[in-house]
Image: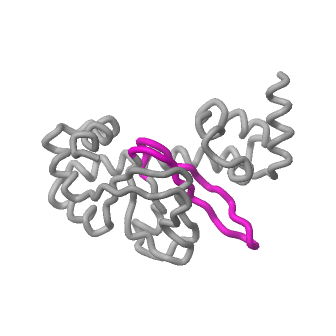
Amino acid sequence: MANSDILIGIKEVTGFSDKELEIVLQRFKAENFKKKTNLLSAGKTAKEVYFILSGCMRLFYEKDGEDISAFFFTEGMFAGAYDSFISQKPSRHSIEVIEECQVLTISFKDLQDLFIEFPKMNEFVRKVLEERFVELHQLFTSYILDSPEERYLNLLTHRPDLLNRIPQHQIATFLGITPVSLSRIRNRVMKK
């Protein structure tokens, strides 16, 4: 992927000027990951975060031999195990590539260097983390207050692309239900 293509992709999200992006881009590495690539395993420390240009990743937990989807990252999003990345402590979750991905990768050290070299990066990262915090808080609240059908309808409204990109059993665990329950909910919604 050419640097100009990368600039166009990241500029849409950041609002940085071309000159500012050139400075920032020097710290990122363009990479491609194949489907089913494991980027982080539970118990390991996240050393990188990824800006997704194309493709999809999944953050998930493992419990009693089963995995539970916690979040799906798609185009224009920063993907990573943020708690582990920021604290540089072992993660409790894993990250895998669901669709082939083109990403920009930045290491913990390079991001820290960018904060010093390019102070505007602090504000940008704060905004990214605030946005992710709000999304995760809404998910948390939804698990407490909403029925499984309401959670499905919310996903259908706010991230409908996921329903065609993600295996149904992973969507089900993300919604906190079984695949059979998801099938019943989908049938009810389709009949309405």
Q: Is residue 181 above or below residue 92?
A: above
Answer with left or right where residue 70 lies relative to residue 149. left
What residue is drawn where x is 26% and y is 57%?
28
Q: Nearer the viewer, residue 114 or 53?
A: 53
What residue is drawn where x is 16% and y is 47%?
22
Find residue 19 and report its horizontal and vertical position in percent.
13, 42
What residue is drawn where x is 84% and y is 32%?
187
Number of callouts: 0
Answer with left or right where residue 99 lies relative to residue 127. right
Residue 62 shown in magenta:
yes
Q: Is residue 161 above or below residue 142?
A: above
Point out the residue furthest to the top here. Answer: 192
Q: Which residues are magenta?
A: 53-78
Residue 86 shown in magenta:
no
What residue is drawn where x is 34% and y is 38%?
13
Which quadrant holds the C terminus?
top right
Find residue 66 and report its horizontal and vertical position in percent.
73, 67
Name the image colouring.
one colour
Find residue 190 and report its horizontal and vertical position in percent.
80, 26
State which quadrant residue 29 falls in. Answer: bottom left
Q: Is residue 115 above or below residue 189?
A: below
Q: Main secondary structure of the magenta part?
A: strand
Find residue 160 and report its horizontal and vertical position in percent.
62, 33
Answer with left or right where residue 141 lies relative to residue 109. right
Q: Nearer the viewer, residue 38 or 107?
A: 38
